[in-house]
Image (cartoon, rainbow, N blue to C red):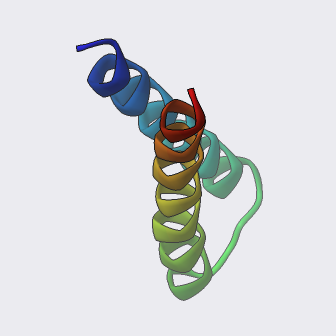
């Protein structure tokens, strides 16, 4: 339960950071899309690796 909640929060934070960055800087859609999915993947793997080591 806690792992899923942390996973959703981390992915939401990473996605919102990319969206805010995209609005602040005029980036092409191709670049912001790649950053969006990479940041969500990094957040998910970080949370899962954190709870795997516990």
In the image, residue 40 sits, relative to residue 14, either above or below, namely below
The residue positioned 33% from the left and 12% from the top of the image is 2
Q: Position of residue 33 (x, y in %)?
A: 48, 74
Occupied quadrant, residue 53: top right
The residue positioned 51% from the left and 54% from the top of the image is 45
Q: Position of residue 12 (x, y in %)?
A: 43, 34
Q: Position of residue 10 (x, y in %)?
A: 51, 32
User: In this view, which residue lies farthest toward the left?
Assistant: 1
In this view of the protein, which residue sits in the foreground, 51 or 47?
Answer: 51
The residue positioned 42% from the left and 21% from the top of the image is 6
Occupied quadrant, residue 39: bottom right
User: In this view, which residue lies farthest toward the front?
Assistant: 54
- Which corner quadrant holds the C terminus? top right
In this view of the protein, which residue sits in the foreground, 24 or 35?
Answer: 35
43 with respect to 6 (left or right): right
The residue positioned 61% from the left and 81% from the top of the image is 31
User: In this view, which residue lies farthest toward the right?
Assistant: 25
In the image, residue 36 sits, relative to residue 12, either above or below, namely below
In the image, residue 27 sits, relative to residue 52, either above or below, namely below
In the image, residue 51 sits, relative to residue 15, either above or below, namely above
30 with respect to 8 (left or right): right
User: In this view, which residue lies farthest toward the top?
Assistant: 2
In this view of the protein, which residue sits in the foreground, 38 or 24?
Answer: 38
């Amino acid at each position: 339960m806690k792992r899923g909640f942390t996973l959703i929060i981390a992915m939401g934070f990473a996605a919102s950071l990319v969206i805010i960055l995209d609005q602040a800087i005029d980036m092409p859609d191709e670049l912001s899309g790649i950053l969006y999915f990479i940041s969500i993947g990094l957040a998910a793997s970080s949370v899962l690796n954190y709870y795997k080591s516990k």
